[in-house]
Amino acid sequence: MDDHIINLYDTDFLIWVERQVKLLRGRQFDQLDLDHLTDEIADMGGQLKRELRHRLELLLMHLLKYRYQRQRTASQLGTGPQLTHITLATPHRNRPALSGPLNASA
């Protein structure tokens, strides 16, 4: 593999990604920057788990706020719980593995 490709990872990430996509689509597997590519794929999985955990935390905070601040009117609370509930499905819609319990390490 060309040292230029590895240097692209550190100097221009977007061009590096575009190059890796082109190589994958062209089935030129021997030219891939496998070390960085596997790191990036692993990071994507962790990022999805962190996003889901974050949205669940927001939903829980809104639900607790709603439960313990009933004296406030619905207009003062806003639509936080409903919006969080609707957007909660987004990060794991096509990722069934995220529907199970969240790993504490993510």
Image (spheres, rainbow, N blue to C red):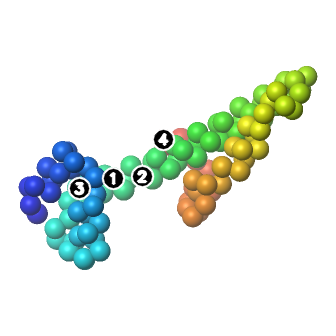
Q: Are marks 1 and 4 in contact (CB under 8 Å)?
A: no
Identify the residue position indicated by label 2 in the image. Answer: 44
Earlier in the chain: of badge 2 and badge 3, it is 3
Spot the residue most to the front.
75
Real-space Cα separation, disc 1 to disc 4, in angstroms: 17 Å
SS label for mark 2: helix
Residues at discs 1 and 2 in contact (Cβ within 8 Å): yes
SS at circle 4:
loop
Distance between the alpha carbons at the discs numbered 1 and 2: 6 Å
Q: Label 4: which residue?
A: 105
> Alpha-carbon distance for marks 3 and 4?
28 Å
Along the polypeptide, which appears first: circle 1 or circle 4?
1
Residue 92 position, x and y percent, is 58, 57
**Left or right side of 55 for 16:** left
Instruction: Residue 104 in the image: state x and y as whole percent.
Output: 53, 41
Alpha-carbon neighbours of circle 4 within 10 Å: few (<14), some, or many (≥20)?
few
- Residue position marked by numbered label 1 in the rendering: 40
Q: Nearer the viewer, mark 4 or mark 2?
A: 2
1 vs 3, front mark: 3
What amino acid type is highlighted by mark number 4? Ser
Q: Amino acid at mark 2?
A: Met
The amino acid type of the residue labelled 1 equals: Glu
Amino acid residing under circle 3? Trp
From the image, state whether disc 3 or disc 4 is nearer to you: 3
Residue 15: quarter of image: bottom left
Give coordinates of residue 81: x percent, y percent.
75, 40
* Residue at figure coordinates x 74%, y 33% from the top left: 62
